[in-house]
Image (spheres, helix red, strand yellow):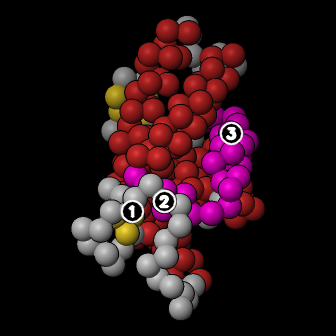
């Protein structure tokens, strides 16, 4: 019998949110690569979109984007809009995608994060915050992506480990790999 502990999920979501907020406010502005810094609001939105998805993911994406906008010197609503769309696309299936495995989550987040950060910095170029397309891509987008992706990896690993699927293994069955079958009849 499987029991869903909703309070545990809420507690872990709040803990991840607080950790990302503290990291965004205290660490991210001081760790720079080129002119780019890590975006922990994007990390938090990605974690929630991949683990919960649906309406909750979209709301968290909007809220984390709004917090990012309020703590940065950027137009209010830009990152909120981008993270809302990002969370919607990643959370379309409304299921825990961390059960699919570590690499699957990293690739989904990586592609989405690159698109969000490129769109964000391209918009900043059009409003005059950046001087050239080279600076937009090479000095802001790519370094921000690299730092954000590196910041996402430990969170994703912990989420995948919590769901129990690391390197094709299922929690509770050490050394037993799932075959190519889509059906698991071992628990019948």
Task: Say above or below: 54 vs 14.
Answer: above
Label 2 – label 3 distance at C-alpha: 38 Å
176 lies left or right of 16: left
Q: Earlier in the sequence, mark 1 or mark 3?
A: 3
Q: Mark 2, mark 1: which one is toward the viewer?
A: 2
Q: Mark 2, mark 3: which one is toward the viewer?
A: 2
Callout 3 environment at 10 Å: few (<14), some (14 to 19), or many (20+)? many
Q: Is residue 117 something one can see in this rendering?
A: no
Callout 1 environment at 10 Å: few (<14), some (14 to 19), or many (20+)? few
| Residue 181 numbered tag | 2
Label 2 – label 1 distance at C-alpha: 7 Å
Q: Earlier in the sequence, mark 2 or mark 3?
A: 3
Q: Which residue is mark 3?
A: 82
| Residue 178 numbered tag | 1
Q: Residue at x 65, y 43 (%)?
A: 86
Task: Say above or below: 114 vs 45.
Answer: above
Secondary structure category for the residue under label 1: loop
Q: Position of residue 89 (x, y in %)?
A: 69, 45
Secondary structure category for the residue under label 2: loop
Label 1 – label 3 distance at C-alpha: 37 Å
Is residue 54 located in the magenta-colored stretch of the structure?
A: no
Magenta stretch?
A: 73-102
Q: Is residue 69 something one can see in this rendering?
A: yes
């Amino acid at each position: 019998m499987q029991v869903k502990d909703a309070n545990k999920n809420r507690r872990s979501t709040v803990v991840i949110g607080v950790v990302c907020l503290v990291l965004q406010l205290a660490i991210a502005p001081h760790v720079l690569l080129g002119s780019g810094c890590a975006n922990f609001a994007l990390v938090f939105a990605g974690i929630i979109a991949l683990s919960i998805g649906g309406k909750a993911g979209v709301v968290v994406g909007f809220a984390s984007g709004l917090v990012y906008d309020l703590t940065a010197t950027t137009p209010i609503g830009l990152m909120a809009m981008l993270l809302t769309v990002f969370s919607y696309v990643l959370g379309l299936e409304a299921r825990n995608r961390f059960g699919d495995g570590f690499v699957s989550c990293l690739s989904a987040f990586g592609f989405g994060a690159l698109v969000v950060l490129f769109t964000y910095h391209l918009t900043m170029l059009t409003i005059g915050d950046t001087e050239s397309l080279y600076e937009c891509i090479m000095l802001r987008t790519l370094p921000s992506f690299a730092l954000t992706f590196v910041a996402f990896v430990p969170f994703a690993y912990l989420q995948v480990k919590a769901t129990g699927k690391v390197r094709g293994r299922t929690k509770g069955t050490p050394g037993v790999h799932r075959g190519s079958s889509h059906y698991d009849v071992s628990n019948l």
